Amino acid sequence: MSSYSERARAILPGGVNSPVRAWNGVGGEPVPIAEAHGSRIVDADGREMIDLVASWGPAILGHAKPEVVAAVQAAAAKGLSFGATTEAEVELAEIIRDRYAPAERVRLVSTGTEATMTAIRLARAATGRTRIVKFAGCYHGHSDALLVAAGSGLATAGVPDSAGVTPGAAQDTLVLPYGDEAALTDAFAEHGAEIAGVIVEAAPANMGVIQPPAGFNRLISTLCRNEGAVMILDEVLTGFRAGPAGCWGIERDHDLAAGLDPWTPDLVTFGKVIGGGLPVAALGGRRDLMEQLAPLGPVYQAGTLSGNPVAVAAGLATMRLLDDDVHAHVARIASSLADGVSGALTERGITHAVGRAGTLFSVFLGLDEAPVTFDEVSRQDTAAFARLFHALRREGVALPPSAYEAWFVSAAHSVNDVRHIVSTVAHWADAEVA
Ligand code: PLP
């Protein structure tokens, strides 16, 4: 164990400030990180690795992109926080709206957790109803009402729900299996008059990456509209990463190509990419709903550091650079990596499935079909994943330390990075079957 790890464990519970950073799911002890540039991350012992964590999503341009760093430095030099609106906040919100039409109005916050928490408050206020439907394995941050059957760190740790969430806080959360149209229709038939909203990850990516079954998001939208509930599409992870307008944009394009009217979420949450690595997240949505937020309406939401100028500078610089060419590169790298890894595993007879949603993917070892529900995901071979994780780490590749997370690529990853990762996976697979 490095001395840095010992110091971390001596002061931070578990040595971390967020549980997904611990290695409980794979065993061993993480070495703290010192710096990161482009596709590489360097630990405090000086080991450089190809990074597939990307800060859990934000680093879509690669780490420490010079233009983003320069924008942050320039903003910081003008003042770290004003507690008043800035032009840059307005511009970032406009960019979000211009690229993501359902976000007619935007409120910037600091974390995805705040965005989803506010979304359910707004849904409840607008409908006068209490119940929220969520899906098992979907993670929407750590507010009490949404910390039920959540994926991400809870899935890795094998705990269904967090301790400390009172029955009162969780009793109005109705948990359904993801992708189960009949369960959703039945829930509305039974509880329709009480359902304030349905919250769903645009594509689940906190239990590994799940491709939404065709028509599932549309069904949620239709049921919500017909039953007077609010559809909350959580694009904190997928937004501006899975595709230029997140997963909604991908589905909209499919709808249009199929001659269908695109469905529209009522509220959308963003985070990660829109902050470019600093704490920016957002709630967007229908104007009439969003205008129920204080100070226009009766739904209270606030934040001392919301729309912080330094954080917004990082987000704005990132969003300005994030054009179609960047997305096309990320898409090429993601599919060549996913296909390369899958091909290497198939050639060696290692049972696996790849879950994909736009440019997001993850590899499920031990499953022969891409899973849809959390129960199906739970049948994956997490011990094999832990072996793969450590084999890659030894060869300079940093995978997320959990079988329940996406493998994140960025615009800075190169074809050579892909080659190295694929050949390392191939060597691991050779050793597994030997
Ligand atoms: N929603 C989704 C889909 C997420 O993936 C996350 C974080 O991983 C959140 C919400 C919570 O965001 P934050 O960690 O910024 O609070």
Image (cartoon, grey):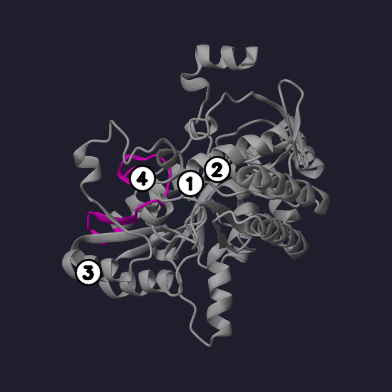
Query: Of residues 393 and 265, which is closer to you in this image?
Result: 393
What residue is shown at x 78% (from left), y 46% (from top)? 420
Which numbered tag is attached to residue 385?
2
Q: Residue 186 shows which numbered tag?
A: 3
Which mark is first along the chain, 1 or 4?
4
Q: Earlier in the sequence, mark 1 or mark 3?
A: 3
Residue that mark 4 sits on: 300
3D distance between C-alphas at marks 2 and 1: 6 Å
Label 1: which residue? Answer: 381
Is 53 in the magenta? no
| Disc 2/disc 4 C-alpha distance (Å) | 44 Å
Q: Nearer the viewer, mark 3 or mark 4?
A: 3
Is mark 1 in CB contact (under 8 Å) with mark 3? Answer: no
Q: CA distance from mark 3 to mark 2?
A: 36 Å
How packed mark 4 is, by other alpha carbons closer than 10 Å (few <14, some 14-19, many 20 or more), is few
In the rendered image, which quarter is residue 219 located in? bottom left
Q: Position of residue 375 (x, y in %)?
A: 36, 54
Crowding around mark 1 (Cα neighbors within 10 Å: few <14, some 14 to 19, many 20+) is some
